[in-house]
Image (cartoon, rainbow, N blue to C red):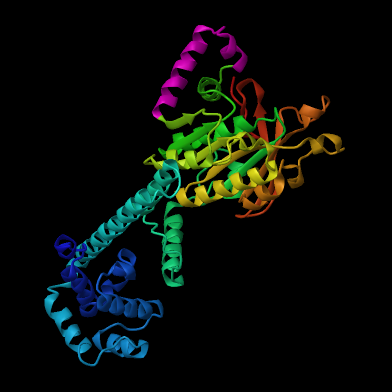
Amino acid sequence: MDELLSRQVPHSLEAEQSVLGSMLIDSRCVSDVIGMVRPEEFYLQQNRDIFETIYAMFNFSQPIDPVTVLDKMKERGVFDEKTTLEYFKQLMDITPTAANVAQYCAIVHDKALLRSIDQAAAEIQESVQAGTGPAVSILENAEKKIYALSHGNTGQTLEHIGTILLKVFDRLTELAESGNAFPGLSSGLRDLDQKINGLNKSDLMLIAARPGMGKTSMALNIALNVAKKYDITVAFFSLEMSREQLAMRLIANESFVDNQKLATGQLSEDEWGKIGLAASALSQTDIRVDDNPAITVAEMNARCRRLDKLGLVVIDYLQLMTSSGQRNASGENRQQIVADISRSLKIMAKELQVPVVCLSQLSRANESRQDKRPMLSDLRESGAIEQDADEVLFLYRDDYYNENSEEKNVAECIIAKNRHGETGTVKLQWLPQYTTFSDLEWRHAE
């Protein structure tokens, strides 16, 4: 009992007081402080009240000094006649200078993080002792809690519009300075990027097509371009092809050596050289491949959380996935299972803050139509997938259905849904011998 009472909750009153004192002494540092600490990170309620008052005044661009802050506290009903005035004097007396405010903020933030870790550890211990559910789900929840802490997402779901706007302006400034034509990661296909604004954080992008149209090739194109261009980790979950088959495709994509030759190993000396260079370039990237055919979204999420520089997740393909906890759910409504999976994928994209590209099969409905171009209603077990996805892209090659097609080796990427811009069609060059796509005017120099 004595041990419990003597246990100190991590906090630093001196640092909290110095942060507040700095803001009162020099209002120029207020905008910096608001970007570094949040109201809930103050341990002492009185300190939190003062910070929230200054915060509210900052959001309304009101002048901040001891007199105006005291007046606002009276207005908000957090002013105490006996103590507040005296406390203000104390705050300003103990703060040596506002120049070190960043260090004071760092201490406040650090102590708040320690309290959050302490709370998460207590909740994990409680769930272990209560035995609520199987060990796997307790472990997953524990991982989620720790991941949320390490990524600054502590589940504070109600956030003031003022802080959200600060983040928006930071993002806009970042975009303006970078000079990029679009905010997301580049897919490597210029015309497509301009239509969809690149691959954006927390987006679920669906690439759907009938078998043989090049879904996996498109996914590999995107994964390879992102891994090479941005020096970030790409997680590729291949439920259909083995790791070796996937690596073979990547080599063909990177080396421009005919796929058929790679499959048979009948290669010239020059081609061996190209493959060696391609393998060397691929080894420099951080593409992680998982070919477990029975993986669930929860397992994917757990594996992705352990990757440090994760920038993109690719899944090939949706209909092969197993719903969490329903490994033998063959008798269940398949539509409901796919709906659960697509919802989980969107939640995963938001939680990991990376784009998730998921491939999907199409039903045969388009085969019976005169115009065989896919539509949203062709998505297998569609409703929920269409609803959860931020972008839906269909791949269509006219020469697949029509031998006399004028558009030989031209693929249409039909953007049927796009939360970041317009829908429409982008034409791409299809290079069948290398199973890869490129911008239409580009031709591989032989």
Residue 25 vertical placement versus 414 (above, below): below
**Where residue 28 sits: x, y (%)?**
27, 74
In front: 436, or 239?
239
Residue 217 seen anywhere in this rendered image of the structure:
yes
Using residue 446 as the reference point, say whether residue 284 is left or right of it. left
**Where residue 94 sits: x, y (%)?**
12, 76
In front: 117, or 149?
117
**Where residue 230 sits: x, y (%)?**
43, 40
Q: Does the segment drawn in magenta span residue 434? A: no
Residue 4 vertical placement versus 64 (above, below): above
In front: 406, or 361?
361
Quarter of the image containing the N terminus? bottom left
Quarter of the image containing the C terminus? top right
Q: Quadrant of residue 334?
A: top right
Specify the segment rendered in magenta: 259-284
Using residue 19 as the reference point, say whether residue 202 is left or right of it. right
